[in-house]
Every structure is written in C-alpha cells, then in structure tokens.
Image (spheres, helix red, strand yellow):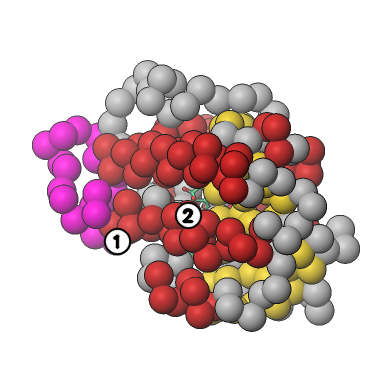
Amino acid sequence: MDVLIVGASGGIGQAMAENFTVNGHHVIGTYCKTVPPKLSESIDLVPMDPSQDADVQNSLSKISSLDLVINCVGFLSSEDGLPEKTIRKFEARGLEESIRINALPTLLIAKHTQKLLRKSSQSVFATISAKVGSIEDNQLGGWYSYRISKAALNMALKTLSIEWSKSVPNCCVAALHPGTVTTKLSAPFVGEGKKHTLLSASQCAGHLSQIVNNLKPQDTGRFWSWNGDEICW
Ligand SMILES: NC(=O)c1ccc[n+]([C@@H]2O[C@H](COP(=O)([O-])OP(=O)(O)OC[C@H]3O[C@@H](n4cnc5c(N)ncnc54)[C@H](OP(=O)(O)O)[C@@H]3O)[C@@H](O)[C@H]2O)c1
C-alpha cells in the first residue's frame, strides 16, 4: 500500500508511520515544526504545513496514488493556555487555533488527495479525532475549544463521506479515537494515578492500523474507537 501519514512528527503519527513501514508498506510522512527521524528506507519525509492550502497542494504534488491517508495532526493546549474548564476561561484565540489545527487540515488534505485515492481499488481516508468531540457522548463539559474543533472535524468527515460515497465510492472515510495515549499532547493531563490506563503510542498504532486495515467502502462515515467499538457522533 501507499500510505500518507500527515503529522508523522507527533507521538501517534510517528508510531503509525513505523507500524505501516514495518508491515511492508510505503509511507509518505509529513511534518511541520518537528523533523522526525527517518525510521526506514520505505518512509519518505515531506515538510508540510497542513493548515495552508497551497502548501498542502505543493507537498502532495509528486504523489501519484494513495491507498490510505491518516491525518494525525492535532492540538490541545499550548504554553499560552490550558483547555478551558469553564466558559470564564474561554478566549477566541484558543478556539481559532483549535479549529485551524484540528478541523481545517482534514478538509485541505481531502481536497488534494481525492484524485490520488480514486486510483486505488480500495482506499481509506481517516483522521484521528477524539471521543470528546462526540456531542452525544459529552457528559462532563469543559474543554470548549478542543471539543468544538473535534466536533467540527467529525462533521467534516461525515459530510465528506456522503460526497465521496458517490464520487470516490472505493474509499472509506473514518474518524478514529486513539484512546488516551502517552504523548506530548496528553502529558499535562495525565496524573500519576491514571498512568497505568494509558496506551503507548505503538500500542495505539497497532490498534488503529488493525481498524483501518479492516475498513471497507460500505463502512464509510463512521467514528471508531481504538478498541473497535463504534462511537456516536
Ligand atoms: N494523545 C492522546 O491521548 C490523544 C487522545 C485523543 C485524541 N488524540 C488526538 O490524536 C492526534 C495526535 O496527537 P498526539 O497525541 O500524537 O500529539 P503530539 O505528539 O503532540 O503530535 C501532534 C502532531 O500535530 C502536529 N501539530 C501540532 N500543532 C501544529 C501546528 N500548529 N501546525 C502544524 N502541525 C501541528 C505536530 O507536528 P509538528 O510537531 O511537526 O509541528 C505533530 O505531528 C491529535 O489529533 C490528538 O487530538 C490524542
């Protein structure tokens, strides 16, 4: 398979890239600020800002076809701010940045990979979302910007699945929840007591690759948890 991992510089993205190369696939891995190590001869690393339309187009212009795309880019907090526990802490800038990193890239990547995925007899287009982006599953509240941006991402994927069921019928579009995984993103929020419940990035990549390997075009437009359960939108 020809596999595109967007955000192969992150904890989960790097582990996904490694998983697919170890299993004999050719991987194109993109990065933005962090240059990842070249883990194998069968991975090509490409710089790309996933929130810039022209940059996504240019970075993907040399690829001739794709069987699998997984967008692993995401943002939860920065040095400026933590996720908002209350509306009193909400700031427009945090929401704008969350939408720019968590929702926008999937739309740009879809725009510029559609013709590449059409060439595959059976393909998957997936993005790592988060269970907290499920509106129906929201029991706890809080984390406004992250939840809203992942809910927007989920709507983008569902809408894309409807369009592509006609125009790219060989492709399955999916949202994936990775579980709670030991990465830079989750580190500030995981207390000592919870560490034993975490997945390592490579365990997560093993679970998620099994899910995408089993997806068929008729499964399009659904939201999957790392353990194979389906999550309500
Ligand atoms: N870890 C968890 O427990 C967990 C739980 C639920 C959902 N998720 C989701 O899983 C995905 C992967 O997260 P992770 O845990 O692997 O996080 P991570 O290790 O922090 O990786 C984040 C990735 O996003 C990219 N990124 C971040 N900010 C960016 C920006 N401003 N512009 C461009 N790229 C940017 C990074 O690229 P560069 O470093 O190259 O800029 C990196 O590839 C995210 O969508 C996250 O929301 C994670």
On the rendered structure, is 48 left or right of 230?
A: left
Quarter of the image where the N terminus is located: bottom right
On the rendered structure, is 136 left or right of 117?
A: left
Q: Secondary structure at mark 2?
A: helix
Residue at 44%, 55% (x, y): give it.
107
Determine whether label 2 and label 1 are within 8 Å by CB.
no
Nearer the N terminus, badge 2 or badge 1?
1
Q: Spatial distance from mark 2 to mark 1, Cα to Cα?
A: 24 Å
Residue at 27%, 37% (x, y): give it.
144
Residue 205 in percent (x, y) is at 70, 49
- Compared to residue 94, the image places residue 178 above or below, namely above
The boundaries of the magenta stretch are: 78-96
- In which image quadrant can residue 146 be found? top left
Q: Amino acid at mark 1?
A: Glu
Q: Looking at the image, can residue 126 be seen?
A: no
Which residue, as the protein is rendered here, is positioned at the far front?
Answer: 166
On the rendered structure, is 85 left or right of 87?
A: right
Residue at 51%, 80% (x, y): give it.
58
- Compared to residue 133, the image places residue 185 above or below, namely below
- In which image quadrant can residue 96 be found? bottom left
Crowd tier of the residue under label 2, counting other residues whose Cα lies within 10 Å: few below 14, some 14–19, many 20 or above:
many
Give whichever of 184, 172 is nearer the camera: 172
- Compared to residue 204, the image places residue 230 above or below, namely above
Which residue, as the protein is rendered here, is positioned at the far left?
Answer: 88
Crowd tier of the residue under label 1, counting other residues whose Cα lies within 10 Å: few below 14, some 14–19, many 20 or above:
few
User: Which residue corresponds to mark 1?
Assistant: 79
Residue 125 in percent (x, y) is at 62, 50
User: Which residue corresponds to mark 2?
Assistant: 106
Q: Secondary structure at mark 1?
A: loop
Residue at 32%, 39% (x, y): give it.
148
